[in-house]
Amino acid sequence: MAAKSNAHSLDPRPAHKFSFGLWTVGNPGRDPFGAPVRPVLAPTKIVELLAEVGAYGVNLHDEDLVPIDASAKKRDAIVAEFKQALSDHGIVVPMATTNLFGDPVFKDGAFTSNDARVRAFALQKTARAIELGVELGASTYVFWGGREGVEAEAGKDPLLALQRFRDALNWLTGFCIDRGYQLRFALEAKPNEPRGDIYLPTTGAMLGFIATLEHPEMVGVNPEVAHERMAGLSFVHALAQAHDAGKLFHVDLNDQAGPRYDQDLRFGSSDLKGAFFLVRFLEDCGYGGPRHFDAHAYRTEDVEGVKDFARGCMRTYLALAQKSKRMQKDAEIQGLLAELSAQDPAASALLTPYSKESGKRLLAARFDRATIASRGMQYEKLDQLVTELLLGLR
Ligand code: GCO
Ligand code: MN
Ligand code: MN
């Protein structure tokens, strides 16, 4: 029997857990300089489109589905219609979130606003959006503090802002516990845009903050490729730290060419090698959550281009996962890695946990610095081999 074609193995399947936001494939191409270029698609149409391209899940902000001023009756009708579309097309809702940035009331933030009326309204809006998310079956609830920041530093006390953010999350974990919801919260950091500076700007900052909450066990992170890169940081290192802390609850995949405005590019379209290392990490670390693409098609595209975009995100992910398996089987690469991990037994014996004994031994040891330093690490060779593997030459 002929071997499965490579093309076929790049088809997305539900087990891959690829998800997109209503706001991503539904993005009509508005930017700060120009009007929308694509028709606004109804949420039910987006579900249909996602099923067509082979995605498994759709995520949403409350307002992506239910307009902010909808009556209870209208809300229920919209939700019922949406649920029908989900079941007709076999699409699930793994994650939900709140729009706390679009309405003018949030112009100075939501949970960290200086105005108590805004803070209270933000809690109410989030509680209702949580009810919606739970109703749709979401198990992760994302918090992206879009406008939780400043331009005029004089206007807000940063300690008070952190306290207010903490108070809000404590209120909301209390709300979920009280209601018996099994939701996990995932905090998403971004350094700037739309505010000059957004509080808790990196995944590392979020991880530090989580430890100060009343229910840290319910709260993790949702790192986004573009956001760490906007801060000039390595995304795979952010992923690793989140995973190490047991806090990798969700992930926002896209691409970004360095520190500039948030580009939300198709996955792997800018830094293919960076994408490779992050796919390799996610596949190897045991992350079992959705692979969510928080990206959108170029403004040059029509609806067919949006499908090309969505298919491209998933295909590139799967292709890179295959490359990662190939790297594991590449004898030359594995040989170099084995050399790197081989350790001098005498030195290893010095690295046991501290005790009076081991301390004495370590302090008495002699090191031949010149010999040790003369070793070439062969990283040039290794990196080139990985590059050639990615180029399809191996
Ligand atoms: C952005 C963010 C958002 C969030 C979304 C879910 O830069 O606009 O990435 O897309 O991920 O609001 O919280
Ligand atoms: Mn983003
Ligand atoms: Mn995001």
Image (cartoon, rainbow, N blue to C red):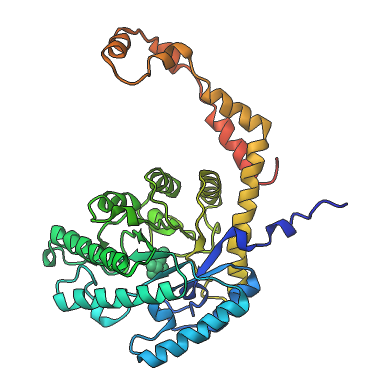
- Camera sees residue 237: yes
From the viewer's perspective, is 58 left or right of 217? Answer: right
Q: Nearer the viewer, residue 83 or 95?
A: 83
In this view, 325 is above or below 255: above
* Residue 375 placement (x, y as % from top left): 49, 18
* Residue 309 placement (x, y as % from top left): 58, 68
- Camera sees residue 42: no
Task: Please identify the quarter of the rendering in which residue 150 is found.
Answer: bottom left
Residue at image point 34% right, 58% down = 189
From the viewer's perspective, is 105 left or right of 35? Answer: left
In this view, 75 is above or below 187: below
Residue at image point 64% right, 53% down = 319
Residue at image point 58% right, 62% down = 313
Q: Nearer the viewer, residue 374 or 242?
A: 242
Number of marks in picture: 0
Picture quarter with the C terminus: top right
Q: Nearer the viewer, residue 291 or 41?
A: 291
* Residue 100 placement (x, y as % from top left): 30, 74
* Residue 15 placement (x, y as % from top left): 61, 59
Residue at image point 28% right, 9% down = 360
From the viewer's perspective, is 384 left or right of 129? Answer: right
